[in-house]
């Protein structure tokens, strides 16, 4: 199945601190390993900043680096995690399923949907 984005919705009562034990593994599945030391260091800093926010029970900042294959987005107005790729791809569905497995293993409740980004809706309506 080809998708633009995978959406993982958390319960409105969900606390971000529950992601503490799952976030590093999720991050490692989304962010591809870099060979360039500068990129690797950047990714490690972003991971640490996300973990610090989660420990404070705040929404993580995500991963939206311009040249990244996948982006991990946390919308400001809801308890949601979005796995996004700039093109329609089967990989998005697979990455979302990998994140689902991690959340299940950590007993975090969620629901999943696909292609619910406003950008996707605009592109689809133009066809």
Image (cartoon, helix red, strand yellow):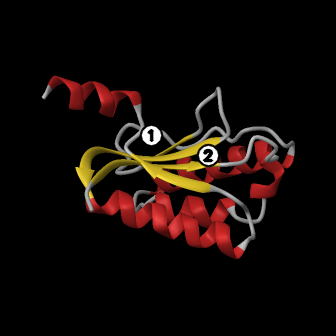
103 vs 41: above or below: below
Residue shown at the point (25%, 57%) measured from the top left? 2
**x, y percent for residue 86:** 29, 41
Is 125 on the left-hand or right-hand side of 59? left
At which x and y percent is residue 58? 79, 38
Q: Earlier in the sequence, mark 2 or mark 1?
A: 2
Q: Which mark is residue 75?
A: none
Q: Is residue 11 left or right of residue 99?
A: right
Q: x, y (%) of residue 117?
A: 41, 34
Residue 120 image-quadrant placement:
top left
Q: Is residue 33 visible?
A: no
Question: Which numbered disc covers residue 46?
Answer: 2
Q: CA distance from mark 2 to mark 1?
A: 10 Å
Of residues 90 and 44, the one drawn nearer to the viewer in this rendering:
90
Viewport quadrant of the N terminus: bottom left
Q: Which residue is mark 1?
A: 65
Residue closest to the eye, 82 or 28: 82
Question: In the figure, is residue 109 to the left or right of 28?
Answer: right
- Residue at the far right: name it: 56
Q: Position of residue 52 (x, y in %)?
A: 79, 46
Number of numbered discs overlaid on the protein picture: 2
């Amino acid at each position: 199945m080809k998708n633009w984005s995978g959406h993982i919705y958390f319960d409105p009562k969900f606390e971000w601190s529950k992601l503490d034990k799952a976030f590093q593994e999720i991050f490692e599945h989304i962010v591809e390993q870099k060979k360039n030391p500068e990129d690797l260091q950047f990714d490690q800093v972003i991971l640490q900043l996300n973990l610090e926010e989660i420990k404070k029970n705040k929404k993580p900042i995500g991963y939206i680096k311009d040249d990244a294959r996948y982006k991990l987005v946390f919308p400001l107005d809801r308890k949601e995690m979005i796995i996004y790729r700039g093109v329609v791809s089967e990989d998005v569905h697979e990455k979302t399923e990998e994140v689902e497995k991690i959340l299940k293993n950590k007993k975090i409740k969620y629901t999943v949907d696909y292609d619910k980004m406003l950008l996707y809706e605009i592109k689809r309506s133009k066809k």
